[in-house]
Image (tube, grey):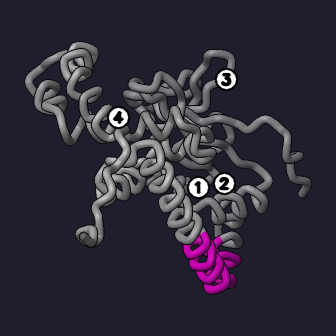
């Protein structure tokens, strides 16, 4: 049977915050509904009842199941905090899921080896970047203790953290982002900022309170280090 083109719009099934009844058969309540023209139908009435649910989490299995399934639908749920619909999984034909699972089992070992190689490559890249960010921190703030510079760089460059070190500017070692990482470290380690937040102080007010202390540390760290003589001068 023909499969839909890759750019075809996906059918969408919604997981409502509260189970609802079907507008067509009036049965329910149902945890999943197909909404079309503001009308919510159960999967059976929407001719999707024969599909099986595959939760998100395995990208390869999901991709292959959709490729093998003539009919599929994306399952979404509304996130109130983020105010948007988020993908929960997909509905696919049972035979398509079985074929996808067989394919994944067949090349599981090779994919595991590839993941290991990718992880090793990323680890080397991260270590190299952390060393570069440490060196840049020490250049901008020569009196910053060496172990503290390593700590700041390691924290700011943690993969997947969303911190300044992982931004495009951070990866380019821009002075502004390096300074932002240093400032953030001082704020949390050398000032009572965290205690102020826990005591209920608004974030902006807490930042204003600790700002002078941060500037004092930054000024001290900007000062060039004084070389220590190796030995007393000869008479």
Do labels 1 and 4 touch, CB within 8 Å?
Answer: no
| Residue assigned mark 4 | 183
Residue 187 place in picture, x, y as percent: 26, 33
- Image mark for residue 92: 2
Give the extent of the magenta segment: 101-121
Q: Residues within 10 Å of mark 2 (few under 14, many from 20)?
A: many
Structural distance between the alpha carbons of marks 1 and 2: 5 Å
**Few, some or many residues within 10 Å of mark 3 (<14, 14–19, 20+):** few
Label 2 SS? strand
User: Which residue is drawn at the image coordinates 79% and 35% (left, top)?
Assistant: 9
Left or right for 80, reference 24: left
SS at badge 3: strand
Residue 113 is one of the magenta-drawn residues: yes
Of residue 222 and residue 226, the one placed in the foreground of this image is: 226
Q: Residue at x 26, y 35 (%)?
A: 217
The residue indicated by pointer 3 is 36
- Judged by depth in the image, the label closer to the viewer, 4 or 3, is 4
Residue in front for this viewpoint, 143 or 91:
143
* For residue 170, above or below residue 84: below
């Amino acid at each position: 049977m023909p499969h839909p083109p890759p750019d075809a719009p996906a059918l969408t099934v919604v997981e409502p915050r509260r189970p609802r009844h079907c507008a067509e058969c009036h049965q329910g309540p149902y945890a999943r509904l197909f909404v079309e023209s503001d009308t919510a139908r159960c999967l059976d009435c929407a001719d999707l009842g024969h599909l099986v649910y595959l939760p998100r989490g395995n990208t390869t299995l999901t991709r292959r199941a959709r490729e093998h399934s003539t009919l599929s639908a994306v399952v979404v749920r509304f996130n109130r905090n983020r105010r948007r619909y988020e993908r929960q999984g997909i509905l696919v034909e049972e035979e398509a899921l079985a074929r996808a699972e067989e394919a994944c089992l067949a090349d599981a070992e090779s994919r595991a080896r590839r993941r290991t190689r990718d992880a090793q490559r990323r680890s080397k890249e991260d270590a190299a970047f952390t060393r570069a960010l440490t060196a840049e921190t020490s250049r901008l703030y020569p009196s910053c203790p060496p172990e503290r510079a390593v700590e700041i760089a390691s924290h700011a460059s943690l993969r997947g953290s969303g911190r300044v070190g992982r931004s495009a500017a951070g990866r380019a070692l821009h002075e502004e982002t390096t300074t932002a990482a240093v400032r953030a470290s001082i704020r949390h380690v050398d000032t009572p900022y965290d205690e102020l937040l826990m005591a209920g102080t608004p974030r902006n007010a807490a930042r204003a309170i600790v700002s002078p202390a941060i500037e004092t540390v930054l000024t001290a760290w900007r000062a060039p280090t004084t070389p220590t003589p190796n030995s007393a001068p000869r008479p």
